[in-house]
Image (cartoon, grey):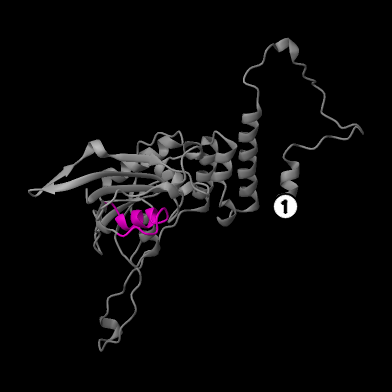
Amino acid sequence: MSALILDTETNSLNGYPIEIAYVPCSFERGVLEIHQKSAFDQYFSCPEPIELGSLATHHILESDIADKPSYEVFRLPENTVYLIGHNIDYDIQAIKLCDSSINVKGICTLALESGQEIFIVMPTCILRTKYDPEHGDICLSVANGFAQLDEENAKLQLQAFGKTFGYIITEIDVKDGFSEKPKKARNTKKSVEQESPQVVEKKPVISIESELQLYLDGLRACTTLAEIESTLFNVDKVGFSAEQKLEITMAKERKIAEFNQPKAIESQENISISEDTITSEDNSPALHPYQSVVDELMS
């Protein structure tokens, strides 16, 4: 087939493809036919960890791709001319990391026009805004899969995120967000009194508290040490305070401690717990388990 409907998932924004799926299609007498029997969908491993933002989008864990073939082995079917998909340029860029010789034409099903209404999925709400190809935050949201063309789909995506981290989201606020970029002033012969004042909204941003909650939720969802390391891969770049870093570190230590706990206690009689205060050999009070972490962060 000369045309494929393609979709990819990557380990990070503009990163390596860790899932590639396509289905051949053709146009017969003006009707699009999908050849479902020839569909392809496979996970691939890559040399870098999965970042938290991407994990929240596609829900693929490190353990899901640990034993999968390398992304480098993927090849498109021969004679592929057209690739069709949502934000297809991003998908083409991803599979070119597998094979730099790929030379195809993309047909984007999300051909957004400047000023078109879109809905951006945020951690706690939905932002209603207009697409602007020169607005960095909006373009990043679209490229990372956090934008929808209608309100209902945006709400469903946010509910899916909540379910991933063990939350049930029922009430979702839809807010107007991402103000237009201020335009440069132009020379005019009209007096200042004749001009109407412009009110520029402040662009909402994700608060540092929301970022902290995302990391804490991500740690609670981890089931292996590798997933913990992947979740905290870029934590130092966020700009957390010393107290917030301590909270993340303590959450990490608690999760690791859960891994090390025995699954069952054979007999209550075999357990001896001293009610005395824990002391060292020189009778001085023992340090709290997290005291060394606190000292390191405060130094």
Can you give x and y, in whole percent of width and height, for residue 13 in the image? Answer: 43, 54
- Residue 13 versus residue 41 in the image, above or below: below
Where is mark 1, residue-wise? 298
Could you say whether the residue bearing mark 1 is in a helix, strand or loop?
A: helix
Which residue lies at the image location 26% right of the left edge and 58% below the top edge?
106
> Is residue 142 among the parts visible in the rendering?
no
Which residue lies at the image location 54% right of the left edge and 47% below the top edge?
212
- Tell me which segment is drawn in magenta: 85-103
Lateral position of residue 152 relative to residue 225, left or right: left
Can you give x and y, in whole percent of width and height, for residue 228 in the image? Answer: 57, 41
Q: Nearer the viewer, residue 198 or 159?
A: 159
The residue sitting at the front extreme is: 78
Q: Nearer the viewer, residue 161 or 167?
A: 161
Q: Give the total number of marks visible in the rendering.
A: 1
- Residue 202 versus residue 238 in the image, above or below: below
Q: Residues within 10 Å of mark 1 (few under 14, many from 20)?
A: few
> Is residue 210 among the parts visible in the rendering?
yes
Lateral position of residue 148 relative to residue 166, left or right: left
Lateral position of residue 285 relative to residue 232, left or right: right
Can you give x and y, in whole percent of width and height, for residue 66 in the image? Answer: 51, 39
The residue sitting at the right extreme is: 282
Quadrant in which residue 23 is drawn = top left
- The reply to whether the magenta stretch includes residue 125 is no
The residue sitting at the bottom extreme is: 189
Task: Say which amino acid is labelled 1.
Answer: Met
Quadrant in which residue 194 is drawn = bottom left
Which residue lies at the image location 31% right of the left edge and 46% below the top edge?
154
**Placement of the C terminus among the 4 image quadrants:** bottom right
Can you give x and y, in whole percent of width and height, for residue 181 in the image? Answer: 35, 69
Q: Nearer the viewer, residue 295 or 200?
A: 295
